[in-house]
Structures are given as C-alpha cells and as structure tokens.
C-alpha cells in the first residue's frame, strides 16, 4: 500500500500539472522567446531576430518609464492607505456592538462586486456634470466647480487610487481581523494587571502579534497592485497620466497586434512585468514558509 | 466611568456607521441611479432618494441590447470553470494533503507560482495559442485559462480543509481495501462538503469577475461576459453614455452576488484566511 502512493499521487496531480503547463507555463516561455524577435500577428510583417533589441528600445521608451512610475505610485500609495485604514477598521469591528456580524458581512460587498463593474459605478459618481462625488468634492473645496476629475492629470490617478482603496480596504480589514482574533486574551489581561494603558497595549501586544498577518496581506496586495489593469482601463483607458504597465502592455500586444510589428516588443514588456512581480512573489513564498509533513 | 463608557459607545457607533456607509454607498447609488428617469438622473444636483421611480432602464437593458446573452455567457463560463476547477483541484489537493511522494514542495510551489503570474505577461502568447486552436470567441477559450488561474487557490484551500479532516475514517477505508480514488470520492469529499462550497463560491466569484482575459479572448459583443459588456456599454451616439442602463445592468448582476456573499460570509472569510493568512 505504501509503495503504491507515489503512483496514485502522480495520477491525481497529472490533470492539474498538465493544465497549468499548457495554459500558464508554455505561454510564459513563449513570451520570453518571442521577446527576442520583431514580428506581428499580421503575416505582412516579416519575423526577425533582434536579440536584446526590444529591451534596449524599451529602456529608451518614455511611455514605458511613465507607466512604470504610475504603477509604482499607484502601488505604494494604495497599499499604504489600505494597510493603515484596514488596520483601523479591523480594530473597530473587533469591538463588541450590535449587528456586528451583519456589518462584517457588508464589508465583503466592495470586494465581491467585479472591479470592472464597480469602476463604472465610480466613473458615474466622478462624472464632471452629474456625479455625486464631484459635487461632494466641490462642496468640500477639494476641487474647483466644473473640474473633470477623470480628465485631469494628477486628479485622475487619485480617483483611481480611491476606487482601489474602497474596494480593497474592507477586505484587508477582514484579513487583519482574522489575525486579531488569534491573539490570546491572556496577553491583554496580564498587561492590564501590569498597568499598561490602551495605547501601550496596542504597541506592545496587538501590533507585534499582527505583524505576520499584516506582512502577508501586504505582499499579497503589492502583487495585485503591481499588475493593476481593470480599474484603470475602465475609468480612463490609461489617459491623462494614468497608464500602468499592464494597460500599456495590452496596447502593445492587442491594439497594435495586426497593425505593426510590435508583438515582440510587447512580449519584452511582459517579461519585464513578470520579473518585477517575481521578485515580490519570491518574498511571498519565502514568507509563507511552505512546509509539508 | 459611566460617562466614559457612553463616549466610547458613541464614538464606536459613529465609526461603524462611517465604515458601513463607505462600503455600501456606491452600490446604493447604483440602485438609486438605475431607478431614476433620465430627466432626474441628469440633474446637476442629484437627490439622495429617487423622486420618481421607473423600471425603464431595467427593461431597456434587455430590449435594446443583448444583456441576457451576456449573463448566460458568464453563467456558463463561471459555472463550468468552478466545477472543473473543483474536480482537478480536489484531486491535486488530496495528493498533497494525504499521500506521501517525493517533490511535494516543488509541486505545490509550481501550482502556487501560477497564482503569482501577472496575467498580462501570458496574455499575448495565450491569445496566439488559443487562436491557433480556434478557441477565440468560444466558451472553452475562456474556461481553460480560468481553470488554470483559479486552480492554485482551489488546490491550496482544499488541501488545508482536507488536512483538518479526521484521518481515522480514511485509514479504516484503506484497510477495507478501498482505493485512494474511491476514498476521495466516497469519504473525503462528502466530509469536506462545507469546504467545497466555500471554495467553489470563491472560484465562481473570481471567474465571474475576471476582466482582462474576457476582454481579450471574447471579441464579439454577443460573446462578451458581464463585466466586459458593462465596461463597454455604448449609447446611441459616441458622446452619449447610457448611465441609467449601465447602473441597471450593474445592479442586476451584483445583487445576486451581494446576497450570496451575505449568506456565505462566514465560510468565505474562513476560506480566504485559510488561503492567505495561514502559513
């Protein structure tokens, strides 16, 4: 029976391995390979080996640097806001109050609505003429009356960040809440006996105990933010300085697939995005400390 | 002490109210906007409650455009993705949770690595691959990529669930000469039913919500899934965006999702924290 196990395991794992090999790993290697060629999906353009040509071209492409900068700003600002706000919200909903279960359930709503759809909801709220958020910001004197929020460089990116924060913060809070509930009550009782006040208890017990949870949620979110596509595509199509790496990459790969020889060039950008995210992913896997048996 | 407690309760409830409004308002606003007639909708100072209610937008969504077809596309794609992902995922998860073999960490790492892949970095090559298999604008052309991107999370969560099941029943089944496949099907899966439901729900939601692949691999409007259809809603002219209809469509497809989430919230949270917090 014992000897049988590896063989059974092989057959059980085969469909999964086969599928991800064909649908994920093969295209990934193909992308690497293609990034050394100049070609198009349109056979009118000849396929030529260009070595590192595409990468060199990419490093001289100001649109690439601009989208990298936008992606990094988006990632740092949104993840930082989501973590801090998420922690605060988690502490609030950890308290006891009426309808606590219902409130926690409601916090899943922003996460459950498809990003493409909630982005349309927000696009309507940011509408320059009839949007309720535009009215609110005018009322609070954050913007001049009549400012098209999604049409202004600078403002548009902030609006996109706001949508991402809206969508992800409650979810982050629920993850942190799960961590909060694991902290043993005795720690707090012991601290109370020692005369520690609320703020001391937060910094000496709550925060250190939460570090593992927050760290993993943080890396998780960073990976997501670096590849952001939906919200940007729906809100602005990447105009007015909101183009992120993924949005630019799709322009190169799909919008120009048949009209120019930019498929190899787009593949080179895909590789860059992959490498960038892999660095974070490796940190993530390391922090998970995969252990079996 | 008493006043201190009252202040604490007041602040707490104010904070909870703010959190609640923040989470729910965009959804509420979509409902309100979808019910307003165009005259009230395109009003410089919108009212928080609709003055008049009309279901015009809800009717137009189905009569002026093929939104029911988009809904059907999404149900088929997300439904088949979920079932396939659960079957393949539970097989892999059982092997990882219960069987002894070499290279387990490598296999699990490979599967998990896929969940880290930025979708866009396989987008181009996957498009070429699907095109050569004549799968662009077909259901399998979207289901195959979806199964492979949901598989890592499915496998990871299920193997966590399987590990928590009591081993004794499986061991006595093995003594009775029950094969591993039969054990999985007849004993483990029924015991893991709550876990399967939670995992299935998460898979369904992520397939239902996916945008980038759907936008790229389904290029005909009658093949669009719901998120793509709503994101690309067009009006009568280029400059006119049918906001009332967009909001109606958004409400139609998110309301069931919201209800599902409210019903299954405990299991979803358990599943998610198993997937991302537990090490």
Image (cartoon, rainbow, N blue to C red):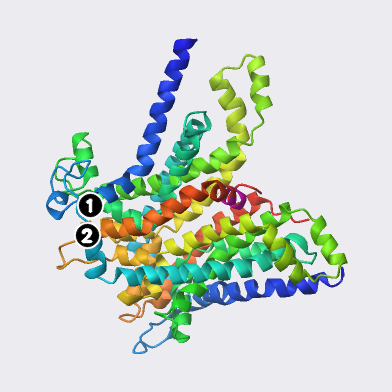
- Residue under the point 77% across and 73% down: A8
Q: Position of residue B154 (x, y in %)?
A: 59, 61
Question: Secondary structure under badge 1?
Answer: helix
Asked if the residue under mark 2 is in contact with the one under mark 1, i.e. CB atoms within 8 Å, the reply is yes
Q: Who is closer to the viewer here, A63 or A215? A: A215
Q: Residues within 10 Å of mark 2 (few under 14, many from 20)?
A: many
Q: Quadrant of residue B54?
A: bottom left
Q: Position of residue A74 (x, y in %)?
A: 39, 50
- Residue under the point 41% across and 27% down: B13
Q: Give residue A156's mark.
A: none
- The reply to whether residue B66 is visible in this rendering is yes
Q: Is residue A172 left or right of residue B188?
A: left
Magenta part, dominant SS = helix
Is A19 magenta? The answer is: no
Rendered view: A126 above or below A33: above
**Tags 1 and 2 both on a single chain:** yes
Q: Who comes first in sequence, dot 1 or dot 2?
A: 1
- Residue under the point 41% across and 23% down: B11
Q: Position of residue B110 (x, y in %)?
A: 64, 66
Which subunit holds the residue at mark 1? B
Q: Is residue A260 left or right of residue A128?
A: right
Q: Position of residue A30 (x, y in %)?
A: 52, 77
Q: Over which residues does the magenta segment extend?
A: B271-275
Q: Please give the residue where the numbered disc 1 appears in the rendered image.
A: B35
- The reply to whether residue A154 is visible in this rendering is no
Q: Please give the residue where the numbered disc 2 appears in the rendered image.
A: B57
Q: Who is closer to the viewer here, B33 or B229? A: B33
Is B274 magenta? The answer is: yes
């Amino acid at each position: 029976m014992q000897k049988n196990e590896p063989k059974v395991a092989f057959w059980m794992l085969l469909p999964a391995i086969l599928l991800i090999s064909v649908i994920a790993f093969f295209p990934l290697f193909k992308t690497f390979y293609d990034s050394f060629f100049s070609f198009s999906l349109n056979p009118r353009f000849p396929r030529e080996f260009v070595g590192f040509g595409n990468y060199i071209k990419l490093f001289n492409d100001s649109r690439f640097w601009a989208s990298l900068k936008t992606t990094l700003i988006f990632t740092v600002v949104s993840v930082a806001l989501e973590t801090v706000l998420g922690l605060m919200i988690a502490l609030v909903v950890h308290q006891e109050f009426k309808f606590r279960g219902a409130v926690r359930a409601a916090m899943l709503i922003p996460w459950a609505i498809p990003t493409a759809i909630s982005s349309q909801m927000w696009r309507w709220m940011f509408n320059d003429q009839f949007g309720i958020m535009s009215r609110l910001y005018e009322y609070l004197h954050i913007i001049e009356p009549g400012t098209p929020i999604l049409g202004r460089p600078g403002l548009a990116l902030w609006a996109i960040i706001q949508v991402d924060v809206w969508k992800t913060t409650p979810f982050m809070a629920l993850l942190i809440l799960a961590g909060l509930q694991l902290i043993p009550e005795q720690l707090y009782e012991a601290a109370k006996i020692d005369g520690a006040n609320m703020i001391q208890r937060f910094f000496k017990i709550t925060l250190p105990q939460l570090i593992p949870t927050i760290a993993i949620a943080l890396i998780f979110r960073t990976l997501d933010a670096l590849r952001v596509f939906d919200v940007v595509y729906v809100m602005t199509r990447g105009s007015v300085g909101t183009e992120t790496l993924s949005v630019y990459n799709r322009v190169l790969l799909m919008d120009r697939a048949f009209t120019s020889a930019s498929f190899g060039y787009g593949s080179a950008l895909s590789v860059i995005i992959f490498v960038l995210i892999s660095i974070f992913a490796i940190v993530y896997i390391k922090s998970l400390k995969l252990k079996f048996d | 002490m008493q006043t201190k407690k009252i202040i604490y309760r007041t602040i707490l409830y104010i904070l909870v109210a703010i959190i609640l409004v923040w989470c729910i308002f965009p959804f509420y606003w979509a409902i309100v906007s979808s019910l307003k007639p165009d005259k009230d909708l395109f009003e410089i100072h919108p009212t928080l409650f609709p003055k008049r209610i009309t279901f015009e937008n809800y009717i137009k969504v189905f009569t002026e455009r093929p939104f029911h077809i988009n809904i059907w596309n999404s149900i088929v794609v997300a439904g088949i993705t979920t079932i396939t992902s659960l079957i393949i995922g539970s097989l892999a998860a059982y092997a990882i949770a219960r069987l002894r073999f070499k290279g387990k960490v490598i296999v699990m790492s490979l599967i998990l690595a896929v969940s880290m892949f930025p979708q866009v970095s396989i987008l181009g090559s996957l498009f070429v691959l699907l095109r050569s298999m004549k799968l662009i604008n077909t259901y399998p052309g979207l289901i195959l990529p979806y199964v492979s991107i949901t598989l890592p999370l499915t496998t990871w969560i299920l193997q966590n669930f399987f590990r928590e099941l009591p081993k004794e029943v499986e061991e006595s089944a093995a003594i009775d000469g029950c094969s591993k496949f039969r054990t999985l099907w007849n004993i483990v899966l029924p015991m893991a039913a709550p876990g399967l439901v939670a995992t299935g729900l998460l898979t369904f939601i992520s397939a239902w919500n996916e945008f980038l692949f759907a936008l790229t691999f389904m290029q005909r409007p009658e093949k669009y899934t719901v998120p793509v259809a709503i994101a690309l809603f067009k009006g009568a002219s280029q400059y006119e965006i049918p906001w009332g209809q967009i909001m109606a469509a958004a409400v139609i497809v998110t309301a069931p999702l919201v209800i599902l989430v409210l019903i299954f919230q405990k299991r979803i949270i358990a599943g998610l924290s198993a997937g991302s917090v537990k090490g």
